[in-house]
DNA sequence: AGTGGCATTGCCTAAAACGCAAAGGAGAGG
DNA sequence: CCTCTCCTTTGCGTTTTAGGCAATGCCACT
């Protein structure tokens, strides 16, 4: 246990938003949890939750405490791991969160490289829209996040940030394959394939089209990057995405990435992130270094 | 309490090196503490202390846990502070550790500047030899450390590191005041004033003299920089120290800092440090930024 | 061998956590 | 408007855990 059960209960309640749900997950009576929360509130001298008819939600003070608690529990877990097996990198789990584009080629490649160095380390990868990725990292559900954003984020530790403009991805035989730079007008002449709403690409594209009074009606809309790519490699459809997403694809499936002459589309930032003020387990930390390194290489290529 | 008492007892035992002493400080029976320690060892599955006839000393695993515990407890304290008084910078204590040279002019000046911005923040300053400073920061007895070192340190978060060669400090009327650069031979022709053993200046000077087969017999040896300065401003004695130590002294007491042509003396590094992986209280964090800024300015001057 | 400084163990008491059941509140829906 | 449902909180008896005290064991030092 190391740390009082109080904090453990507290984070669970914060996570599920009600005593009842937490009681279910923790297999502990509701009353017990209720008392622990009361105790915490007494100790801090402020209410940590707002009591709503349908559950409990963190107050401002509660959020501060929740952050502390999550940091602490994660740290404890990592330290216990390091203690129980003395070799630094045998605390064997790296939990990654990323937006879809990285999940198919880039991250698997990095994981493979890492795996050759430390075969006993396991991975968990979760992909989602940028907002989810950010949230997972912030709450410690993932160790490392890789995604896109349009503005600078706070409440998160930024390991690396780099401009990652939205590109047009098209097959070598495409009519536009000869042009180095495309315009928005070029895009309107071909069917488009793009990620669902909630992703930065989609948002930026919609803004760009709206700014020029054009309607944006993609032929294909999916929540999987690979769907788009597959489609684009065999048709004249133009997929919208990032250069990194196709970096390292097998030659047979290769796509070309073309820049698009539209300022809005340049605004996208790639972000590599971890939880703020968190001490990472050894395995995560070394993986992070590798990832950062490979990311920089890929960005330059 | 927030966190189980176990960790609290644990760090205290680690700090004083025996159950008996910890029992005294905590006002808790020895047996109670002994049981908490046993419980921790059971939970981690490894002994955390080596039992010696004269007390207990941390094992390797124990050290890992102790670091975690200290991080956690400090973090908890800081979060509680932030909660109880919601304004970020009202958690009112900044604990500084530095080597003697900074304690007289430089740090007081920074504290004054800070105090004008946040009048309710209090300070604790402890000065000592570099080894102590480092230790205080490492164990969380101080929030921020400012000192010198000869090699790169680990187990500590380096906020800023900069070359800080040992200089000769002499009064404007001194026979050597005209020279821009002094040699070791110059130093032998005048009485010297220098800090006690354990400080980097002293160490480097002794090495330098030894390397040239000279004996090192300072006229004045003190553990207070100001003693040396006072002495040097009114005699032809040369004080050894850092440029920063005299930065901002009132004109009447002013000394000149001269570089010395001796590679060994250039090796000294100034280090601004905090505990590794620790989340600092808001007040400490803002003070640190100010300090860092002023330090950079002073270094350029 | 004896002594003093330590840590551990056994036993008992005090305090804290837990579970169950009942009570109190506040929307949702008929 | 009343009831139903889904919450949380409270009261009470039981169980678990921490604390204190005194006895024991260990080891070095004299």
Image: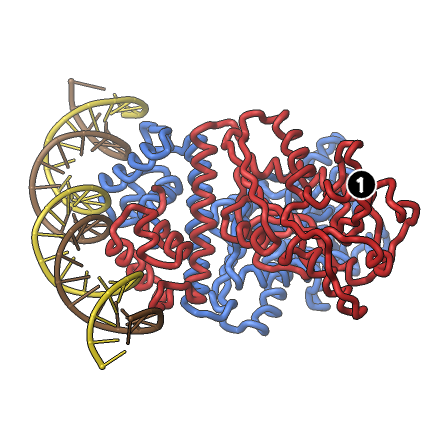
Chain colours: A red, B blue, C brown, D yellow
**Residue A222 in view here:** yes
What x and y, as percent, mark residue A205? 74, 60
Q: Is residue B61 left or right of residue A185?
A: left
Position of residue B6 relative to residue B106, above or below, is above
Q: Residues within 10 Å of mark 1 (few under 14, many from 20)?
A: many
- The quadrant of the rendering that contains the C terminus of chain B is bottom right
> Which residue occupies 73% across, 53% down?
A219
What x and y, as percent, mark residue B77? 42, 57
Chain of the residue under the numbered disc 1 shown in the image: A
> Which residue occupies 73% across, 65% down?
A207
What x and y, as percent, mark residue A73? 43, 46
Q: Quadrant of residue A61?
A: bottom left
In the foreground, A145 or A187? A187
SS category of the residue bearing label 1: loop
In the foreground, B80 or A183? A183
Q: Is residue A67 left or right of residue A5?
A: right
Q: Label 1 belongs to which residue?
A: A255
What x and y, as percent, mark residue C30? 29, 71
**Residue B188 in view here:** no
């Amino acid at each position: 246990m190391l740390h009082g059960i109080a904090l453990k209960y507290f984070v669970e309640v914060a996570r599920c938003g009600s005593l009842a749900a937490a009681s279910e997950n923790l297999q502990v009576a509701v009353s017990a949890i209720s008392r622990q929360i009361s105790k915490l509130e007494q100790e801090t001298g402020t209410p940590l939750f707002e009591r709503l008819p349908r559950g409990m939600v963190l107050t401002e003070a509660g959020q501060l405490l929740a952050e502390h608690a999550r940091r602490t529990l994660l740290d404890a877990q990592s330290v216990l791991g390091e203690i129980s097996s003395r070799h630094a990198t045998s605390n064997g789990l790296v939990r990654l969160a990323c937006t879809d584009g990285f999940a198919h080629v880039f991250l698997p490649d990095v994981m493979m490289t890492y795996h050759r160095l430390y075969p006993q380390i396991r991975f968990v990868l979760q992909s989602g829209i940028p907002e989810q990725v950010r949230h997972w990292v912030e709450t410690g559900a993932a160790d490392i996040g890789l995604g896109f954003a349009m503005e600078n984020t706070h409440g998160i530790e930024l390991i690396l940030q780099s401009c990652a403009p939205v590109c047009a991805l098209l097959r070598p035989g495409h009519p536009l394959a000869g042009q180095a730079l495309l315009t928005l007008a070029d895009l309107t002449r071909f069917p488009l394939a793009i990620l669902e709403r909630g992703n930065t690409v989609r948002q930026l594209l919609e803004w760009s089209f709206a700014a020029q009074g054009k309607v944006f009606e993609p032929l294909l809309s999916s929540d999987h990057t690979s769907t788009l790519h597959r489609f684009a490699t065999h048709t004249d459809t133009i997929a919208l995405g990032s250069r990194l997403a196709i970096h390292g694809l097998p030659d047979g499936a290769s796509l070309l990435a073309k820049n698009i002459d539209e300022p809005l589309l340049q605004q996208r930032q790639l972000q590599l992130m971890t939880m703020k003020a968190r001490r990472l387990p050894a395995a995560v930390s070394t993986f992070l270094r590798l990832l950062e390194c490979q990311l920089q290489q890929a960005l330059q290529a």
